[in-house]
Amino acid sequence: MSSTPSRIAPRTRPSMADVGRLADVSAQTVSRFFTGTGYVSAETRTRIEAAVAELGYRPNHVARAFRVNRTNTIGVLTMGTMNYGVSATYAGVTAAAHATDYSIVISHIDVDIDDPGALEEARRGLDTLQSLQVDGIILATQYRDADELLEGISEQLPVVTLSGRPLPTADTVALNSHEAGLLATRHLIELGHERILHICGPQNRNEAIERERGYTEAMKEAGLDVPAPVPGTSWGAESGHHAGLTVDPASFTAVFAANDAIALGFLSAMRSRGLESPRDFSIVGVDDMPETAFYSPPLTTMRMDFDELGVVAFDMIRRHIESGERVDLRVLPSALVVRESTAPPTR
């Protein structure tokens, strides 16, 4: 005996009209409730909220985008290794967006800009963001040559760059890496150190260049010889560890490391050689990663507020989108956090 399979009616999404019928109001009133463009009494709002919850209604943002020619979506593009600074900046951007009606779409290109085809890969990432009809783009990369990625884009969309290099076609916000290098080195000089070594970050990054510039400036203003900086291959601890295995311990009494991870690697390598901080040398990092307070010893560092960087970048791009208003270069300050890895020289 055969049977005819029963047909299941396709599910349909509840509409704004369905919400209005259940709440006993017009669809136009429901629309005002969601857009905030007109008066809706407190009692009516309560009925609409109850109807929305019962029906599981979600506003159709795609349809709204067609009407107002805006998606309330911001694209974020980053390049390189996902490290503390990048993730903390993401956190700031997404937290700021969460407090509004904007959404964030992130495109992370996990390649070094010096790799063959890296810029082309980044351009594809930007093309993807534009195909999603984002209202603006935050270019969150510190690579020196990444600014050319903006060619043609900033003429069509608001753009905020975190590169630290002001551009005529994009708003810019940056952390003050030059100040970080300057203040970190001055701290060591004020403790009485004269032979201060600098372990660099990767030299294709604006941050690394600016931190080295601050270090050099502080050394020269104190009338001290500037030893050749130790080249850095990455922002990772392995770079600092390699430096710690190769430097001559007799050539310095203090170290300015381009970031906290490099400082951690250097501390580990020096410990393997029987040398401890601050007994044998002082060391300062940059970033103030949360775990630096638990290093051995707790690390003196320059605090860089990456979360605030993300918040400010979001506020700048939102203002540009909504009002067309450009914002002058914003540079966020750094701050010295003194812990146990620095002390007056003992030799």
Image (spheres, rainbow, N blue to C red):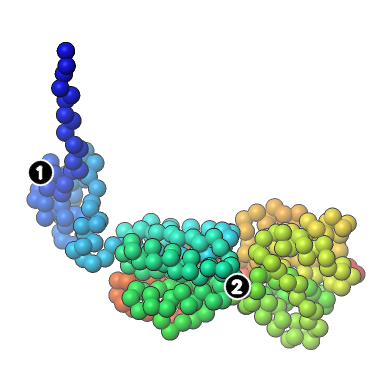
- Classed neighbour count for the residue bearing mark 2: other residues with Cα under 10 Å, few (<14), some (14–19), many (≥20): some
**For the residues bearing labels 1 and 2, Cβ distance under 8 angstroms:** no
Instruction: Name the amino acid type tagged 1.
Output: Arg
**Residue 262 % position (x, y):** 70, 63
Mark 1 or mark 2: which comes first in sequence? 1
**Residue 139 % position (x, y):** 46, 69
Q: Name the residue under label 2.
A: 205
**Residue 329 % position (x, y):** 47, 80
**Horizontal arrangement in the rendering, residue 66 relative to residue 163 (left or right):** left
Residue at the far top in the pictured view: 1
User: Residue at image x 70%, y 78%?
Assistant: 215
**Horizontal arrangement in the rendering, residue 328 relative to residue 1 (left or right):** right
Q: Nearer the viewer, mark 1 or mark 2?
A: 2
Residue toward you, 127 or 36:
127
- The answer to whether residue 31 is seen in the rendering is yes
User: Residue at image x 20%, y 43%?
Assistant: 13
Q: Mark 1 points at which residue?
A: 21
Mark 1 element type = helix
When asked about the image quadrant of residue 4, the answer is: top left
Residue at the far front in the pictured view: 1
Instruction: Name the amino acid type tagged 2.
Output: Arg
User: Residue at image x 63%, y 77%?
Assistant: 210
User: Residue at image x 43%, y 65%?
Assistant: 124
When asked about the image quadrant of residue 31, the answer is: bottom left
Q: In this view, does 9 lie above or below 270?
A: above
- Classed neighbour count for the residue bearing mark 1: other residues with Cα under 10 Å, few (<14), some (14–19), many (≥20): some
When asked about the image quadrant of residue 2, the answer is: top left
Tell me the quarter of the image containing the N terminus.
top left
**Residue 236 % position (x, y):** 67, 60
Tell me the quarter of the image containing the C terminus.
bottom right
Q: How many marks?
A: 2
* Distance between the alpha carbons at the discs numbered 1 and 2: 58 Å
